[in-house]
Amino acid sequence: AQSVTQLGSHVSVSEGALVLLRCNYSSSVPPYLFWYVQYPNQGLQLLLKYTSAATLVKGINGFEAEFKKSETSFHLTKPSAHMSDAAEYFCAVSGRNQGGKLIFGQGTELSVKP
Amino acid sequence: KAGVTQTPRYLIKTRGQQVTLSCSPISGHRSVSWYQQTPGQGLQFLFEYFSETQRNKGNFPGRFSGRQFSNSRSEMNVSTLELGDSALYLCASSLVAGGATQETQYFGPGTRLLVL
């Protein structure tokens, strides 16, 4: 069975500081991995996805994530946080034969201090 | 191109009632998935439809059902509502359902259901 663990339900950084949101996955087959962002009272917006083309994936709004098979990790980073990055972030995994079924982590709420 | 739309956006029901939520996918998208989001359980997969057929189902009781129409629009129904069904219900659409290339799922804004 597949699963996702996001370390830290809440992360707080200062504006301009590095953002690091941690995600570890469990999958018996090579997975597809995703990061989504959710702003208050909105749906989910895709930040980036890993589909085995490249281990370092660049997404929107300056975010990127690196797939590390040996560590079963897919951490999300951004070099310099902006106030507008404050939101909840979800890591998700999908198997290659799972169709549209995404398994989500519990989410990490990111706060950005001025 | 218009995004995924969900109606209604907000809904209040009482225990024992039933409810139907609607989702219109992005034009040309044929796969629609539904998710339930609650503070306690997080985001959980309900089911997925592709070409009017249910392709995948999550671990929810039979009170939760869905269908997809020939124009790819989808509805989900919850019968005999319980207090625990209060949640944000999210719909997502993609061009195809899985396969060799994982298509991106685009989410709608959700329907917030409150059961009293």
Image (cartoon, coloured by chain):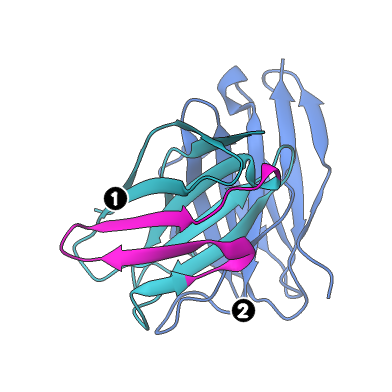
Chain colours: A cyan, B blue
Percent coordinates x, y for residue B82 in the rendering:
60, 21
Tell me which corner region of the image, top left, top right, bottom left or bottom right, holds residue A70.
bottom left
Farthest residue, direction top: B116
Number of labels in the image equals 2
Q: Secondary structure at mark 1?
A: strand
Percent coordinates x, y for residue B31 in the rendering:
60, 71
Give the residue type at disc 1: Asn
Q: Can residue B78 be seen from the camera position used here?
A: no
Decide if residue A81 is on the left or right side of residue A92. right
Mark 2, Cα crowd under 10 Å, few <14 / some 14-19 / many 20+, is some
Q: Secondary structure at mark 2?
A: loop
Q: Is residue A75 magenta?
A: yes
Q: Are marks 2 and 1 on the same chain?
A: no
* Quarter that holds the N terminus of chain B: bottom right
Q: Nearer the viewer, residue A100 or A43?
A: A43
Q: Which residue is mark 1?
A: A24
> Which mark identifies residue A75?
none
What segment is highlighted magenta in the picture?
A58-83
Seen in the picture, residue A93 relative to A39 is either above or below; the reply is below
Q: Is residue A19 magenta?
A: no
Q: Which residue is mark 2?
A: B95
Chain at tag 2: B
Seen in the picture, residue A90 relative to A7 is either above or below; the reply is below
Decide if residue B45 is on the left or right side of residue B112. left
Q: Can residue B35 be seen from the camera position used here?
A: yes
